[in-house]
């Protein structure tokens, strides 16, 4: 009897997910389902991070580096595997010629588009555990103050950015605090770690056109002569738009392209590297826009739509 009940629950659960994939349920139901599992991911990641930090700081069973790497893997399991499985209404389309994650095996920097709070979730949907174990990113320092999620950010060991203002287009930072972070970044790179970051520096509210890339991280790339990979995405802003006042999780077709930017460190500087990379990423972004137009895609979320 117990097995029959379990089988019935599994059947109903997966039947619901199938309807989600077909997008035949009311949009508010799909958004609520996504938000529910997003919150569950935060709670699970917070719990795991608390346990790992206790094992590190109180029991001295783990090194700080190992604890942080394991917490990043936890996030890849929660926000990645769990949230992805429960978000079948978000369809990911990989563009032709895109590199597989398995091809990225050496220390490098990975540049990503930043148009939505969903960007990080999508990154975690596909990143291998072996990759995230050795990769960190940058995050606004104020995120560390958020309930539960702030503990997750600290536990992952991501590098904080101490902006002097919370304004959307303000890039001024606390130089003293950021100098200490820069030293930590250099130590991380010196140990063979990789960086994944948003070169635009802040949310781009015009996702069809990439903003100018900030040069700070490109100076580090040049000094270490690191290989550069990039991930171009479009449609993330429809899942969770930066101006959205209600709950996120709109259905959307999200397009993805992974590539490697070839450059000669002997002939480039930070400015030319950032400019050339932006041009190449914009080219792939234009391909995505053209494909969506040819397919007659109609977004579920539109700017200015009433909540």
Image: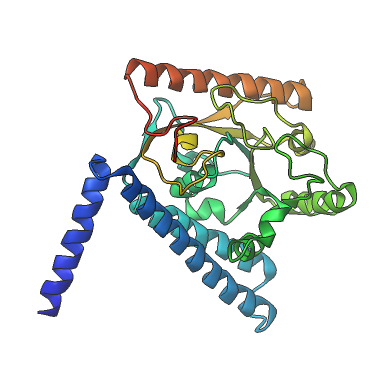
Q: Residue at x 69, y 78 (%)?
A: 57
Q: Quadrant of the C terminus?
A: top left
Q: Residue at x 62, y 19 (%)?
A: 279
Looking at this view, is 51 or 189 the one in front? 51
Query: Measured from the top left, where is residue 90 in percent x and y?
Result: 36, 41
Q: Quadrant of residue 212?
A: top right
Q: Choose between 24 and 51: the one closer to the eye.
A: 24
- The image's colour scheme reads rainbow
For residue 191, above or below residue 277: below
Rendered view: 17 above or below 250: below
Residue 77 vertical placement versus 94 (above, below): below
View extreme (front): residue = 306
Q: Quadrant of residue 204?
A: top right
Q: Specify the quadrant that holds the N terminus.
A: bottom left
Measured as percent of width and height from the top left, residue 278 is found at 64, 23
Whether residue 253 is visible here, answered yes or no, is yes
User: Residue 133, position in %: x, y?
Assistant: 57, 57
Residue 64: percent from left, percent from top: 68, 69
Q: Nearer the viewer, residue 265 or 27?
A: 27
Q: Is residue 131 left or right of residue 140?
A: left
Name the foreground residue: 155 vs 204. Answer: 204
Residue at image x 65%, y 45%?
Answer: 195
Q: Is residue 166 left or right of residue 12?
A: right
């Amino acid at each position: 009897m117990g097995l029959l009940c379990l089988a019935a629950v599994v059947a109903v659960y997966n039947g619901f997910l199938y309807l989600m994939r077909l997008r035949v349920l009311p949009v508010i139901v799909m958004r609520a389902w996504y938000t529910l599992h997003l919150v569950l991911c935060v709670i699970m990641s917070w719990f795991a991070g608390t346990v790992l930090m206790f094992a590190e700081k109180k029991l001295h069973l783990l090194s700080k580096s190992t604890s942080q790497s394991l917490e990043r893997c936890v996030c890849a399991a929660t926000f990645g595997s769990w949230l992805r499985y429960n978000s079948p209404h978000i369809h990911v389309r990989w563009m032709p010629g895109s590199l597989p994650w398995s091809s990225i095996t050496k220390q490098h920097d990975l540049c990503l588009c930043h148009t939505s709070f969903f960007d990080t979730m999508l990154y975690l949907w596909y990143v291998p555990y072996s990759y995230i174990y050795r990769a960190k990113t940058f995050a606004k320092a104020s995120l560390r103050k958020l309930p539960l999620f702030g503990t997750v950010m600290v536990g992952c060991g991501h590098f904080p950015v101490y902006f002097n203002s919370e304004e959307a287009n303000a890039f001024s930072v606390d130089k003293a605090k950021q100098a200490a972070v820069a030293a930590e970044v250099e130590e991380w790179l010196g140990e063979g770690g990789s960086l994944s970051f948003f070169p635009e520096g802040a949310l781009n509210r015009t996702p069809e056109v990439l903003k100018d890339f900030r040069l700070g991280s490109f100076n580090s790339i040049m000094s270490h002569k690191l290989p550069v990979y990039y991930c171009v995405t479009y449609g993330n802003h429809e899942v969770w738009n930066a101006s959205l006042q209600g709950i996120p999780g709109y259905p959307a077709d999200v397009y993805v392209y992974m590539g490697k930017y070839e450059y000669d460190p002997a002939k480039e500087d930070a400015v030319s590297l950032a400019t050339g990379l932006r041009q190449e990423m914009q080219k792939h972004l234009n391909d995505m826009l053209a494909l969506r137009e040819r397919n007659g895609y109609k977004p579920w979320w539109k700017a200015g739509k009433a909540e």
